[in-house]
Image (cartoon, rainbow, N blue to C red):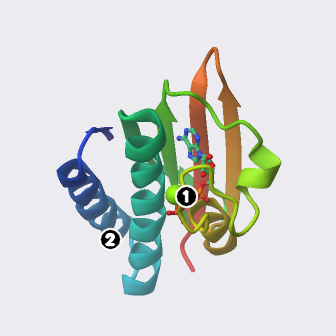
Amino acid sequence: MTISIRSEDDVHYARHEGIEYANSIGMETLDSTKVSIIISELAHNIIKYAKKGFIRFSKVTNEINTGILIEAIDNGPAIHDIEKALKDNYSTGGSLGLGLPGIKRISDDLIIHSSKEKGTHIKVTYWKK
Ligand SMILES: Nc1ncnc2c1ncn2[C@@H]1O[C@H](COP(=O)(O)OP(=O)(O)OP(=O)(O)O)[C@@H](O)[C@H]1O
Ligand SMILES: [Mg+2]
């Protein structure tokens, strides 16, 4: 599922759909709440830094578990320094700078590709607990 992100309403919609999707693959409230926090942080960054982009969800499985892959995609100005962006309190937007480090803490895997040419593509995997 892919959701276009341009406004705060879109962020709410993406959170809602993310919770439904997490529930549909058998996640309980604590898991789906974390999924919704991840979506909220990624989607707010899209609006704040790139103005528009997409949030996408898909199911991931391995031999023993099921999870959700949440992707955030935009063609904005890119993240200048990915290492710094993952540190607490680093923000180029005069904000708290806790979004990406928070996602890193609560998710199982976080991969960031970001360049001026291709924009930003963030992949977060969260496995059912
Ligand atoms: N989609 C994006 N495009 C460009 N830069 C981004 C994007 N997402 C994050 N960044 C950069 O990474 C930094 C860290 O992001 P993070 O979400 O951790 O903090 P923040 O958005 O500045 O503050 P907070 O999320 O706590 O309100 C941002 O300040 C910005 O420089
Ligand atoms: Mg943020």
- At 39% from the left and 61% from the top, the residue drawn is 40
**Callout count:** 2
Q: Secondary structure at mark 1?
A: loop
- At 39% from the left and 67% from the top, the residue drawn is 36
Which mark sits nearer the N-terminus, 2 or 1?
A: 2
> In the image, is residue 45 above or below residue 17?
above
Relative image position of residue 29 (x, y in whole percent):
37, 84
- At 56% from the left and 27% from the top, the residue drawn is 77
- Most extreme residue toward the top is 117
- At 65% from the left and 20% from the top, the residue drawn is 116
Q: Which quadrant of the structure image shows residue 113? A: top right
Which residue is more in the foreground, 124 or 129?
124
Residue corresponding to mark 1: 94
Q: Which of the numbered marks, if any, corresponds to residue 73?
A: none
Residue corresponding to mark 2: 23
Q: Amino acid at mark 1?
A: Gly
Which residue is more in the foreground, 103 or 29?
103
Q: Which quadrant of the structure image shows residue 79? A: top right
Relative image position of residue 50 (x, y in whole percent):
45, 34
Q: Are marks 2 and 1 in contact (CB under 8 Å)?
A: no
Q: Quadrant of the C terminus?
A: bottom right
Q: CA distance from mark 2 to mark 1?
A: 35 Å
> In the image, is residue 71 above or below residue 74?
below
Q: Amino acid at mark 2?
A: Asn
Asked if ligand 1 lies within 8 A of label 1, the reply is yes
- Most extreme residue toward the right is 83
Kindly tell me whether residue 56 is visible in this rendering.
no
- Most extreme residue toward the front is 94
Relative image position of residue 35 (x, y in whole percent):
45, 67
Query: Mark 2: few, some, or many residues within 10 Å (few <14, many ≥20)?
Result: some
Q: Secondary structure at mark 2?
A: helix
Kindly tell me whether residue 50 is visible in this rendering.
yes
